[in-house]
Amino acid sequence: MTMSLPEHLLQQVGQAVRVAYQGNPGAFSEIAAINTVQGAAAHGYATFHEVIAAVSSGQAELGVLPVENSLMGSILQAIDLLVDTDLHVIGEVVVRVSHALMALPGVQLPDIKRVYSQQPALDQCPTFLNKHHLTPVAAHDTAGSAKDLAERGARDEGVIASARAAELYGLEVLQNHIEDEAFNFTRFLVLSHREGLPTSGPYKTSVIFAVRHSPGSLLDTLNQLSGLNMVSIVSRPRKDRAWSYLIHVDFEGNADDPEISSALGAVLRKASYAKIIGSYPMAQAPIEP
């Protein structure tokens, strides 16, 4: 299910909407990117910073950043970037993460000695790796590992990545769904220059704030949201002040609703710093790669 197009993208009827993501084609981030809006054209970048820069400079109309995995928790580097950017969060996409073991055509599982992938992917498949006596080797990217193996031509190596990566790089999937836990999803925030169109259905709002260094300040500020359904709270150190922290909170509700608007106003008054990252439609169903 794709999102409603923001106003500045409605003018691009008949044109592909450029969506920036971190990684190589076949990465789960690319799967998120091509499912943001109908007709999305995904463009990969090496880092999260470059994704932000691509949208900020107009190289891309939208960008996707992974902010949370259901097994590994918050993706802190991405959350930190939300503090400094002027981009708006206009939506979220949830992707089901299913790992596949792949190798060069004709290679069999007993031939493989080493398996390459991004560290989180390796960490999610220990039972399979141990059962088959495979040595995990950490790499920068899941799909990038598939691309590297195809170029290297090593017949004693395998890769853990999406099944889409195997298709793109001419590898063969030896086994699907090798992760220990099936309940594995990554949530991506969708960034744009402008706010999205109002839509029906449930909303989520994301806010970042800091509090004064005095007894009870944090509790007092959080209490302003006590009537709302908070779904995530993450504490991050500030870059400009030692031993001071930013609190990132996600809660259900539209910032335009009177109850939500009143609560946000109370947070702004209590906090020493506050920023609304976005108020956006919640993802309704996970994307199956």
Image (cartoon, rainbow, N blue to C red):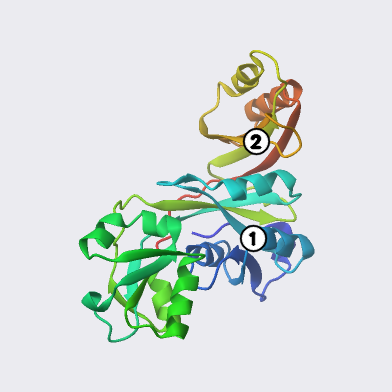
x, y (%) of residue 91?
Answer: 59, 51
> Is there a contact, CB below 8 Å, between mark 1 and mark 2?
no
Vertical side of 223 occupied by 116: above or below: below
Vertical side of 1 occupied by 281: above or below: above
x, y (%) of residue 154?
Answer: 38, 83
Q: Which residue is mark 1?
A: 63
The amino acid type of the residue labelled 2 equals Pro
Q: Residue placed at 38% from the left, 52% from the top?
A: 184
One can see residue 183 in this view: yes
Mark on residue 155? none
Q: Residue furthest right?
A: 57
Quarter where residue 116 is shown: bottom left
In the foreground, 202 or 125: 125
Disc nearer the start of the sequence (1/2)? 1
x, y (%) of residue 236?
Answer: 62, 36
**Element at label 1:** strand
One can see residue 199 in this view: no
Mark 1 vs mark 2: in front: 2
Q: Residue placed at 49% from the left, 67% from the top?
A: 27
Q: CA distance from mark 1 to mark 2?
A: 25 Å
Q: Quadrant of the C terminus?
A: bottom left
Q: Residue placed at 64% from the left, 16% from the top?
A: 220
Q: Residue placed at 70% from the left, 15% from the top?
A: 214
Mark 1: few/some/many CA within 10 Å (<14, 14-19, 20+): many
Q: Which residue is mark 2?
A: 237
The amino acid type of the residue labelled 1 equals Gly
In the foreground, 220 or 239: 239
**Element at label 2:** strand
x, y (%) of residue 243?
Answer: 67, 29
